[in-house]
Amino acid sequence: MEKDFSNKDKIFILFSCIFVSLLVLSNILAVKIIEVGGLVGPAAVLVYALSFALSDTLVEIWGKEKVKYVIKVGFIASLISAIFIRMAISFPSADNWTLQQEFEMILGSNMRIVLASMVAYLVSQFHDVWSFNFWKKITGGKHLWLRNNLSTIFSQMIDTVLFIFIAFYGSGLPIISMMIGQYTLKLIIALLDTPIVYLAVKLTKDNINLSLKETTNIS
């Protein structure tokens, strides 16, 4: 009989799915430009910044190699979503459906945004994994808050500059102020998500330990 997933496997799959979902969603939300407290940036900042908290949690529990695989899966998922969005735009509209122009207006620039997102995503996420692991070795596995913030702060800066430049250069939009606005928003979210990382790591370790105890008792 096939063995059931362990709690550790289930949590890994859950976190990985959330990570990929946030990434795909950010490609769509990036079309809208928002302003929060005078800071300007793509709406995707609200969800994409959280992906770094998830990747740090994954590295802390499962190590960098598994997280690199999840990052690659996210890349493939985003590419597939972009292709199908483009196909949906190109399909002939039904006679009684009159929203083709609006549909294309919102999602038509998806390919450029996905390209920008993917370049920034791959560079920044792989840097985040490397940086988090680097600081983990330096601190001897202690000071999770420090490792989380140091790795995220610089990775978010890389992501912001690459994404804004590739996605919006030549569009007439104020890309410098967008970079400053988006990075500031990401920085605020990064600082605020530290308790979330601590909670996720603690709950995961507690569930893993509980699973191991139950297995030992059964044996």
Image: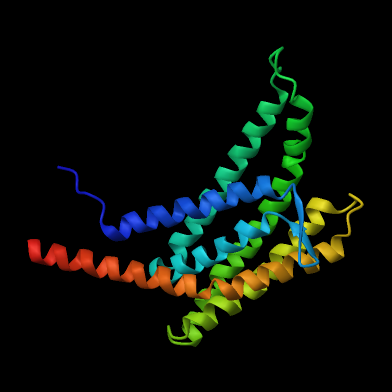
| Residue 127 locus on image (x, y percent) | 61, 68
In terms of image quadrants, where is residue 191?
A: bottom right
Q: Is residue 126 left or right of residue 1?
A: right
| Residue 175 locus on image (x, y percent) | 85, 60
Would residue 41 be seen by someone viewing this image from the given angle?
A: yes
In terms of image quadrants, where is residue 77?
A: top right
Residue extending farthest top: 95
Which residue is found at the position 50% from the left and 60% from the top?
68
Which residue is found at the position 83% from the left and 52% from the top?
168
Total labels: the figure holds: 0
Image vertical order of residue 16 relative to residue 195, above or below: above
Quadrant location of the N terminus in the rendered image: top left
Which residue is found at the position 90% from the left and 51% from the top?
170
| Residue 167 locus on image (x, y percent) | 79, 51
Quadrant location of the C terminus in the rendered image: bottom left
Would residue 219 be seen by someone viewing this image from the given angle?
A: no
| Residue 190 locus on image (x, y percent) | 60, 71
Colouring chosen for the image of the structure: rainbow
Image vertical order of residue 80 relative to residue 144, above or below: above
Q: Is residue 213 left or right of residue 170?
A: left
Q: Is residue 114 left or right of residue 202?
A: right
Image vertical order of residue 35 relative to residue 180, above or below: above
Image vertical order of residue 86 relative to residue 140, above or below: above
Which residue is found at the position 52% from the left and 51% from the top?
20
